[in-house]
């Protein structure tokens, strides 16, 4: 019985690691004169969902004073098939931060 439980636990952990190994969320920081914005960028719909989770988690921790107050987090969707260059990505992060309520 112990071997079955151990095998099931190891298999479940392995599948969890395999599932998260493909999720790649890039992060970029934009300095806005003493105030920074961290942009989590998802290149696929699944990555964008993960980027939203990371940004929401960061914002929750920031509001609880667990993260720096001078850094805001946003999620950027780059899964539409159009690759953004560095300038466009920076502008997207800034626009998302300005559109987000404090």
Image: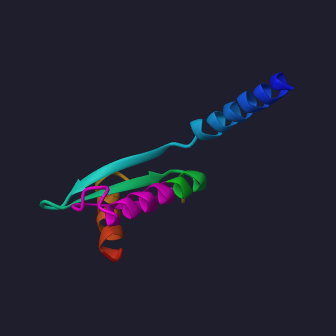
| Percent of width and height locating residue 47 | 54, 51
Q: Which residue is farthest left?
A: 33
| Percent of width and height locating residue 19 | 65, 39
Query: Magenta includes 41?
Result: no
Magenta-tinted stretch: 51-78
For the rendered model, the colour scheme is: rainbow
Q: Nearer the viewer, residue 78 or 101?
A: 101
Q: Split into 4 quadrants, where in the image is the N terminus?
A: top right
Residue at image coords 50%, 58%: 53
| Percent of width and height locating residue 15 | 70, 35
Residue 50 in view of the camera: yes
Residue 81 in view of the camera: no
Residue at image coords 32%, 68%: 97
Res 6 → quadrant: top right
Residue 6 falls left or right of residue 99: right
The answer to whether 35 is drawn above or below residue 17 in the figure is below
Q: Split into 4 quadrants, where in the image is the C terminus?
A: bottom left
| Percent of width and height locating residue 39 | 36, 56
Res 32 → quadrant: bottom left
The answer to whether 101 is drawn above or below residue 23 in the figure is below
Q: Which residue is farthest right?
A: 1
Q: Nearer the viewer, residue 78 or 57?
A: 57
The answer to whether 14 is drawn above or below residue 83 in the figure is above
The answer to whether 51 is drawn above or below residue 5 in the figure is below
Residue 56 falls left or right of residue 10: left
Residue at image coords 12%, 61%: 33
Res 4 → quadrant: top right
Q: Nearer the viewer, residue 51 or 87?
A: 51
């Amino acid at each position: 019985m112990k071997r079955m439980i151990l095998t099931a636990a190891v298999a479940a952990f392995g599948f969890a690691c395999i599932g998260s190994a493909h999720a790649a969320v890039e992060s970029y920081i934009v300095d806005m004169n003493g105030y920074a914005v961290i942009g989590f960028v998802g290149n696929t719909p699944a990555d964008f969902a993960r980027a939203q989770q990371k940004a929401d988690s960061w914002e929750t921790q920031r509001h609880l004073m667990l993260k720096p107050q001078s850094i805001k987090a946003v999620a950027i969707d780059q899964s539409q098939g159009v690759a953004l260059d560095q300038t466009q990505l920076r502008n997207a992060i800034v626009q998302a931060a300005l559109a987000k309520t404090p």
